[in-house]
Image (spheres, coloured by chain):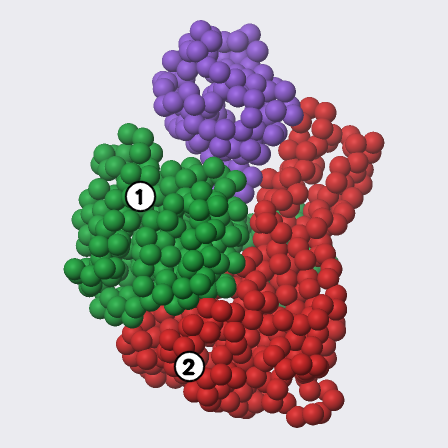
């Protein structure tokens, strides 16, 4: 069961919701031995969930993507590789083929179309995946696992790392286990990769004109991908009722309204989870979890 | 030798030098041997996501240029390709005509760049 | 006229970057051209209320499409596509435009020439007159578009062109979030980078990441600490960080719901909270920035 937590605008509270929801659910699920929650931080450019959720590191592995390398012995300088590369990642000098792997999209065209097999594909490091067990507030809590992926600075695309992280999670955890994906902000490729196969998308917004404007873009995106979704309003109480009006007019369900509280902001600033200290927030997580359970799997 | 000028328009010797190299509108290649000035459009690079500089540098290589002259800075990728192809680069020529740029070049008014200046 | 491009970034979203940028746009008035480079979630227009004087479509990269009349259903395209963008139902091969990376491999190897590559419509760019007596250049990305930074570069180029034509001294850029290509495209070649941060562990974490990136470009940096009284200890730590990293502390703003009230009323905070500490701090901030770009 994959739940993606996304938003149009940055800073609305995706990570706040992801971390608190994951921790809350892990403490609530019955002592069924299969009961588990996996929190996955897919905001690979700026992963922040790890500031709030700590655990015991189980695995720490580099992630790679395939890029070509030039075999000068086999190359006849025919230039076919330069012609087929649609990303300008290959330059043909008088006696050399130059490859710009940071521009390579790993399509394999040059490698497979080279008549001399002079461009074998090799792995290039793009980031790091870390797998934490017994994560969260409660000691020895086996119910919460935390996976964080971090993109190397200089890497052009977050998409391959997000994809590989999701594959890792699917290979290591069975379908019934609840997986919460903390998405990157916005609506471009990395977000699409994160949410496109989610069973349910929760869009987090703030009740202001900025929040509403970006929420509409996010809603359009989620609908385009045919995902089931609902809204959680964070910092409820500020701004205006524009978001609520919009949801009403468009038959969009609001499954949680997390109240605006200075105490919450203050705890957040210190890297603390909120639900165990603020009952009003825990109440909202209860409602959100109930909504999740109602989804047809 | 052959000299490449990055330009904003296709107007022969009156063309204005481009401040951009990778996404220049086009390039003129001047052959000192034959006194011919030939235009090459850089149209396909206008839409490139990344790597326009690499492709633009490729044009210079394909024309067997020894020198490239551009009006603004040279980005790191274009620099790398041209440098490895032993093509000399002269940047910051400003928005002058190709005629003026060539004249300035012959009078040694331009400094060769030895590192990307972007 | 010397380049006086000022970019406002934050690393992390939600620190108040757009609120600060809009306030600077108001304070600058016709002394600046404004560029909204946060193309994935462009919001400046909500406060600047531009009149959309001119729009143009923007293309970047390509997408494949299959002409079923020519297709012989050999399936070769599907077998080589690394992005799982080609599917078939009842021998009708179709390209999923959202997954298509635009590499062109399928088009090259199709034995019947049934696959064509077309330029992708990535977004739209607008040049408008804002209500603050300045020009706003802004854009938005299409959904699922690749944000390579190219549209950001285009927005900046237009802003520069307009500033030159109108002899406008400053360009104020609302930058992209994160640390990837769009941010790099936002900051490269500018004269001053303003980082808006907040005293939270996330804010501090992203401040150090983003300032590392900016250092590589050797551009002068200044910092605005927003919501400063939310966590005085972290505000203090951030101030120490700024000193040790040669980043000018431009100003400090309090955690105050007047920011939200202002946005909700469609105003920048300097218009809404006149004669307040916030207003005078932002005015001083703008003065410091103007000195900083000399």
User: Closest to the observer: A273 or A198?
Assistant: A273
Q: Quadrant of the C terminus of chain A?
A: bottom right
Q: Secondary structure at mark 1?
A: helix
Q: Quadrant of the N terminus of chain A?
A: bottom right
Chain bearing tag 2 is A
Which residue is most to the right?
Answer: A73
Residue A129, given in percent of the width and then of the height, sits at 68, 62
Q: How packed is label 1: few (under 14 Cα within 10 Å), some, or many (20 or more)?
A: many
User: Closest to the observer: A81 or A9?
Assistant: A9
| Residue at 55% in and 15% down | B2
Residue A262, given in percent of the width and then of the height, sits at 37, 75
Q: Can you tell which mark lies on residue A258?
A: 2
> Which of pointers 1 and 2 indicates the residue nearer the eye?
1
The answer, for residue C70, to whether it is visible in the render is no
User: Residue beneath label 1, please?
Assistant: C289
Colour in which the image shows chain B: purple
Relative to C221, C115 lies left or right: right
| Residue at 72% in and 77% down | A173
User: Closest to the observer: A77 or C219?
Assistant: C219
Which residue is most to the left?
Answer: C275
Q: Kindly indicate which chain is depicted in green in the rendered structure.
A: C
Colour in which the image shows chain A: red
Residue C284, given in percent of the width and then of the height, sits at 25, 49
């Amino acid at each position: 069961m994959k739940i993606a937590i996304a938003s149009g605008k940055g800073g609305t509270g995706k990570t706040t919701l992801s971390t608190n929801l994951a921790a809350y659910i892990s403490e609530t699920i019955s002592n069924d031995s299969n009961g588990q929650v996996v929190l996955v931080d897919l905001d690979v450019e700026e992963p922040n969930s790890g500031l709030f959720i700590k655990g015991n590191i189980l695995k720490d592995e580099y992630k790679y993507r395939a890029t070509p390398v030039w075999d000068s012995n086999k190359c006849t300088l025919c230039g076919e590789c330069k012609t087929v590369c649609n990303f300008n990642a290959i330059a043909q000098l008088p006696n050399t083929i130059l490859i710009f792997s940071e521009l390579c999209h790993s399509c394999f065209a040059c490698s497979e179309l080279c008549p001399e097999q002079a461009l074998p594909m090799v792995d290039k490091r793009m980031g790091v995946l870390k797998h934490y067990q017994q994560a969260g507030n409660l000691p020895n809590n086996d119910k919460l696992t935390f996976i964080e992926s971090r993109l190397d600075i200089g890497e052009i695309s977050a998409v391959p790392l997000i994809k590989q992280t999701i594959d890792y999670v699917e290979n290591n955890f069975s379908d019934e286990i609840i997986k919460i994906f903390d998405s990157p902000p916005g609506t471009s490729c990395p977000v699409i990769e994160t949410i496109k196969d989610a069973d349910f998308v929760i869009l987090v917004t703030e009740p202001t004109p900025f929040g509403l404007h970006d929420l509409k873009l996010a809603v359009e995106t989620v609908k385009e991908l045919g995902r089931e979704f609902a809204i959680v309003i964070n910092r409820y109480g500020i701004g205006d009722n524009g978001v609520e009006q919009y949801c009403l007019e468009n038959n969009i369900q609001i499954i949680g309204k997390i109240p605006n509280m200075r105490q919450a902001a203050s705890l957040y600033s210190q890297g603390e989870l909120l639900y165990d200290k603020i009952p009003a927030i825990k109440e909202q997580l209860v409602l959100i979890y109930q909504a999740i359970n109602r989804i047809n799997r | 030798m052959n000299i490449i000028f990055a330009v904003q328009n296709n107007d022969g010797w009156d063309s204005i030098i481009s401040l951009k190299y990778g996404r220049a509108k086009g390039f003129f290649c001047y052959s000192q041997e034959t006194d011919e000035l030939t235009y090459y459009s850089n149209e396909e690079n206008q839409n490139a996501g990344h790597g326009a500089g690499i492709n633009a540098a490729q044009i210079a290589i394909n024309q067997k240029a020894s020198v490239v002259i551009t009006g603004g800075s040279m980005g790191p990728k274009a620099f790398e390709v041209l440098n490895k192809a032993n093509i000399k680069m002269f940047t910051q020529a400003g928005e002058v005509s190709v005629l003026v740029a060539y004249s300035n070049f012959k009078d040694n008014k331009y400094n060769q760049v030895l590192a990307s200046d972007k | 006229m010397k380049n006086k491009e000022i970019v406002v970034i934050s690393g992390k979203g939600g620190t108040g970057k757009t609120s600060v940028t809009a306030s600077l746009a108001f304070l600058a008035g016709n002394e600046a051209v404004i560029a909204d480079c946060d193309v994935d979630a462009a919001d400046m227009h909500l406060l600047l209320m531009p009149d959309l004087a001119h729009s143009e479509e923007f293309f970047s990269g390509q997408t494949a499409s299959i002409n079923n009349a020519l297709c012989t259903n050999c399936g070769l395209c599907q077998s080589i596509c690394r992005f799982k963008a080609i599917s078939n139902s009842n021998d009708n091969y179709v390209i999923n435009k959202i997954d298509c990376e635009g590499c062109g491999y399928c088009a090259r190897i199709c034995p019947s020439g049934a696959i064509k590559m077309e330029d992708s419509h990535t977004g739209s760019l607008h040049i408008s007159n804002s209500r603050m007596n300045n020009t706003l250049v802004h854009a938005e990305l299409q959904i699922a578009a690749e944000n390579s930074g190219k549209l950001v570069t285009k927005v900046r180029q237009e802003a520069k062109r307009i500033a030159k034509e109108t002899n406008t001294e400053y360009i104020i850029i609302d930058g992209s979030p994160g640390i990837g290509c769009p941010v790099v495209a936002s900051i490269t070649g500018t004269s001053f980078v303003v980082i808006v941060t907040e005293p939270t562990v996330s804010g501090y974490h992203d401040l150090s990441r983003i300032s590392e990136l900016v250092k590589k470009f050797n551009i002068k940096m200044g910092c605005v600490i927003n919501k400063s009284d939310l966590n005085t200890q972290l505000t203090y730590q951030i101030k120490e960080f700024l000193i040790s990293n040669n980043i000018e502390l431009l100003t400090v703003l309090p955690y105050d719901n007047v920011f939200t009230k202002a946005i909700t009323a469609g105003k920048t905070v300097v218009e809404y909270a006149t004669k307040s500490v916030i207003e005078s701090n932002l005015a001083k901030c703008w003065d410091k920035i103007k000195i900083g770009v000399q």
